Image (tube, helix red, strand yellow):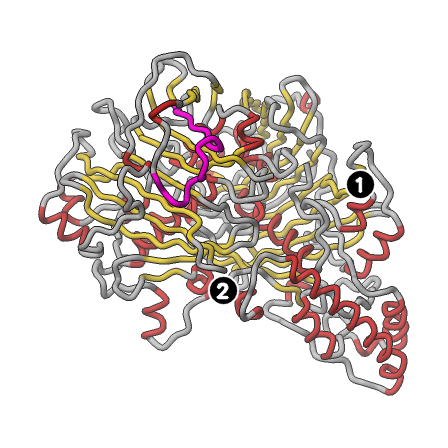
Amino acid sequence: MTTSIAASAFFSGSPAPAPVASKNALGERPDSLDLRGIAAKPASSSAAVRAGKTRVHAAVPKVNGVKSAVADVEHETMSSPAPRTFYNQLPDWSMLLAAITTIFLAAEKQWTLLDWKPKRPDMLADTFGFGRIIHDGLLFRQNFSIRSYEIGADRTASIETLMNHLQETALNHVKSAGLLGDGFGSTPEMSKRDLFWVVSQMQAIVERYPCWGDTVEVDTWVGAHGKNGMRRDWHIRDSVTGHTILKATSKWVMMNKLTRRLARIPDEVRTEIEPYFFEHASIADEDNRELPKLTDLKSATVAKYVRTGLTPRWADLDINQHVNNVKYIGWILESAPISILEKHELASIVLDYKRECGRDSVLQSHTTVYTDCNNGSGETTLHCEHLLSLESGPTIVKARTMWRPKGTKPQEIMVPSSS
Amino acid sequence: MLRCHTLPQCRLLAQPGAGAGVLRRRVAPGGTARWGAAPRVSGVEASSPSRAAVEGGERPSMAERLRLGSLLEDGLSYKESFIVRCYEVGINKTATVETIANLLQEVGCNHAQSVGFSTDGFATTTTMRELGLIWVTNRMHIEIYKYPAWGDVVEIETWCQEDGRIGTRRDWILKDLANGEVIGRATSKWVMMNQNTRRLQRVSDEVRDEVFVHCPKAPRLAFPEENNGSLKKIPIRTDPAEHSRLGLVPRRADLDMNQHVNNVTYIGWVLESIPQDIIDSHELQTITLDYRRECQHDDIVDSLTYIEEGEERCTNGSAFAAPHPEEQRQFLHCLRFAGNGHEINRGRTVWRKLAR
């Protein structure tokens, strides 16, 4: 079910030694960190990254415990080179050179695999919105203009449109790092072992919705999640004003394609993806409350709705004929009463993915609306719990949504303290 | 051009008095707000945004650069490029026909906007509004010779023309930007209707002058060849359908601002009753849809598919079509209300064998 969402595992094409050297350098020279707590790279490797669209300088310094404000990185391309010292230069050069040569060859190979034949790669890459890796390889950024058919009934981009952009940038991130394996859900090393990434949870907070013709800028990056998982975060901004549109985070686990059981991340995969980890949370205050079983919800202040007979159409399926993740959101909202949708907008959503479904599934969507939430200024925010299940019983997705009245300013949202 | 053209929400209604007054438009109420918010002078002087910006000495905005569309020099057609995104790609790793239909709709809208037609969302000229006239889609015909894949860039050119006394036509040509190859063509037919009486209306000279000033005067057809598929009649079949999918339900995302189902959803429904073995082994080459009635959120729809054989087989003689008829499969379709069996759409699809 997640093969349609890009695996964000990354491959560094270069051998391991380079990271070690840099780490030492980093440990010895904390003043090489720029204001944002990220070590700057020498200019030579920056240029190579741009040209090859892969991570040339595999040495991503792991900045332990430094949570830099990525939100400040608005229109940055490459940070300025670190001050060069004798110590810095000596051990790095030969390894760097070897790494660069190897990567260039790998990058050229990857490049020829792409169908698109750019004549002026830099311009076209950005012009057509391919996106680019920035910030020393830690972030991927891409712009989208909102198309007219992506607008919902209230004249703004739907949450599905925004989630589609998240999916697209994740995939382009993986692709420009040069490590798409088969399908959309595995890196080459993972494909060899019949492994793929599965999304287990997704959270998104929407501060404002863009309109037709707006352009949005999407940043995405990956990090670790526990000992055996991965996370991918996103931050969407209005590309003109810089205002935040959406923040999201997702958690991923590794699954074996054949046994359909969870798997440990093999060391080879770990070595490859860890250089790309950037420990920065998009959502400062994640909602970690458990999503309740619907049968537990018995209260006078709830109202329940259901929509049955939902079936996937051909266009809902990914290349493995599983339903694309983003489609679940549409189905979840199918049973939300129209009275909510007309007067409120979705402020946040938490999704727990339990199972996948395919072409022949028939689903039902349940929504339970809590009507007793109030924010500080007395305006009603709504809280709903959702369940999407097969009509035969098994749960596909659980979700929680918060809604604010249309026209509310983002700062006025409050998350209720008890579920 | 006429913004209404580009809102294939309009539909020919068979029942008089049906629909609560206002005929719904496409899923672009955002479009409405936008056009309403930025009224423009109609006419050629309100040229494409990027052109205006350049004339004014400003760099085109990011939106305009990303949109990559503009009127051609003669002002008679509009061209725009789109990159295919991962979620627009289907089980064959290529763009779905719904994606193509969405892009056609998008470029039509942008064309209308670029010639400066400002509307209240009903895509009408001043005269039409005074007379209570609107455009409704009659027929949509799309042929795709090569489906673009994820990351490909598609360049679409579109224009409008008169079509008889009551109609107008919008045509499209799709090309792969990388090599200039034509990968698809499409045409759509629209008629003018009085929104109150629901009767068809002839295009008066006043309206013609307003509407067609931006159209090529000499006929320009996406399908110039004789006996092409876009003109073929779609018969009604009374025998039981070989394949069907019953109980299809509109989703919220399928509805436009006026709560009617949008065009692209009908295409999806038509494909629902195609059998799995055809989907697995063939790809859609041509789809023709005749619109009869519209449907809303609470309707339930049945999708029926009939095999079309014999002399009625498509002989459009196009060089682009599959060279060997044996590699083609052809079907007739009907979408109807599950309750009363009234016809919503009827269609024809032609499938070519996938070279796997």
| Percent x, y of residue B160 | 26, 50
Image quadrant of residue A94?
A: bottom right
Q: Which residues are magenta?
A: B317-333
Q: Does any portion of residue A412 appear in the rendered image?
A: no
Mark earlier in primary sequence (2, 1): 1
Q: Residue at x 57, y 50 (%)?
A: B150
Quadrant of the rendered structure where residue B262 is? top left
**Considering the numbered disc 1 on the image, is that residue within a helix, a strand or a loop?**
loop
Identified at 61% across, 21% down, the residue is A300
- Helix, strand or loop under label 2: loop
Asked if residue A13 is among those painted magenta in the image, a careful observer would answer no
Q: Which mark is residue A194?
A: 1
Q: Is residue B69 left or right of residue A130?
A: left
Check the image and report above or below for B257 versus A121: above
Q: Nearer the viewer, residue A363 or A369?
A: A363
Residue in view at x 48 percent, y 23 percent: B273
| Alpha carbon separation for disc pair 2 and 1 | 43 Å
- The residue labelled by disc 2 is A240
